[in-house]
Image (spheres, grey):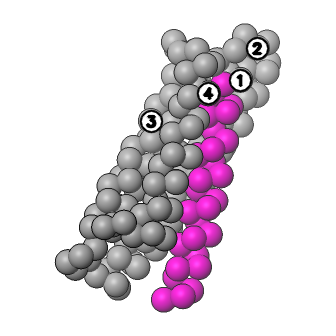
């Protein structure tokens, strides 16, 4: 199980690197940039999103493997809360994909300021997961 935990953490950390960086690309895309720069940034965002998705799948599969191995019994409310936060992270991931699609079609209607705030969501969710896993408040 230690190997599974190790690779789970590796994939989660790698996935989060993408979740932290992709919205930063959106900040740049939302600002006035020359067309060639815009095209380049959309290409970067597409490749990053594809790579993030590849990383998210084993992170989730290995996490579910750990969950099945250790079980989800009574007194583990922290695990229920963690799974809910992971679901929010998956929704955030797909939301990033929809935003990428609108950038690719030049249909963005949000400001760079919005994306700066949007970029903080995975930081907050990661903090919540860490508190739930390390401190296990309930």
Residue 95, compared with residue 86, is above or below; it is above
Determine crowd level at label 1: few under 14, some 14-19, many 20+ residues with C-alpha closer than 10 A: some
Q: How many marks?
A: 4
Which residue was labeled with disc 1?
28
Q: CA distance from mark 4 to mark 1?
A: 10 Å
Q: CA distance from mark 3 to mark 4?
A: 15 Å
**Sequence-wise, which precedes: disc 3 or disc 1?**
1
Q: Main secondary structure of the magenta part?
A: helix
Horizontal side of 19 relative to 84 (left or right) equals right
Which residues are the magenta region?
A: 1-27
Q: CA distance from mark 2 to mark 1?
A: 8 Å
Q: The C terminus is located in which quarter? A: bottom left
**Sequence-wise, which precedes: disc 4 or disc 2?**
2
Q: Is residue 76 magenta?
A: no
Callout 3 secondary element: helix
Q: Is residue 7 magenta?
A: yes
Which residue was labeled with disc 3?
95
**Sequence-wise, which precedes: disc 3 or disc 4?**
3
Callout 4 secondary element: helix
Q: Which mark is residue 116?
A: 4
């Amino acid at each position: 199980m230690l190997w599974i935990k190790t690779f789970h953490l590796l994939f989660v950390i790698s996935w989060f690197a993408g979740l932290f960086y992709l919205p930063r690309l959106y900040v740049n895309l939302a600002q006035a940039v020359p067309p060639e720069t815009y095209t380049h940034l959309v290409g970067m965002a597409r490749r990053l999103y594809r790579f993030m998705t590849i990383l998210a799948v084993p992170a989730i599969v290995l996490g579910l493997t750990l969950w099945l191995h250790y079980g989800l019994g009574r007194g583990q409310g922290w695990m229920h809360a963690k799974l809910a936060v992971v679901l929010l992270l998956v929704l955030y991931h797909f939301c990033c994909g929809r935003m990428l699609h609108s950038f690719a079609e030049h249909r963005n209607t949000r400001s760079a300021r919005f994306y700066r705030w949007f970029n903080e969501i995975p930081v907050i969710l990661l903090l919540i997961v860490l508190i739930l896993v390390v401190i296990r408040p309930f």
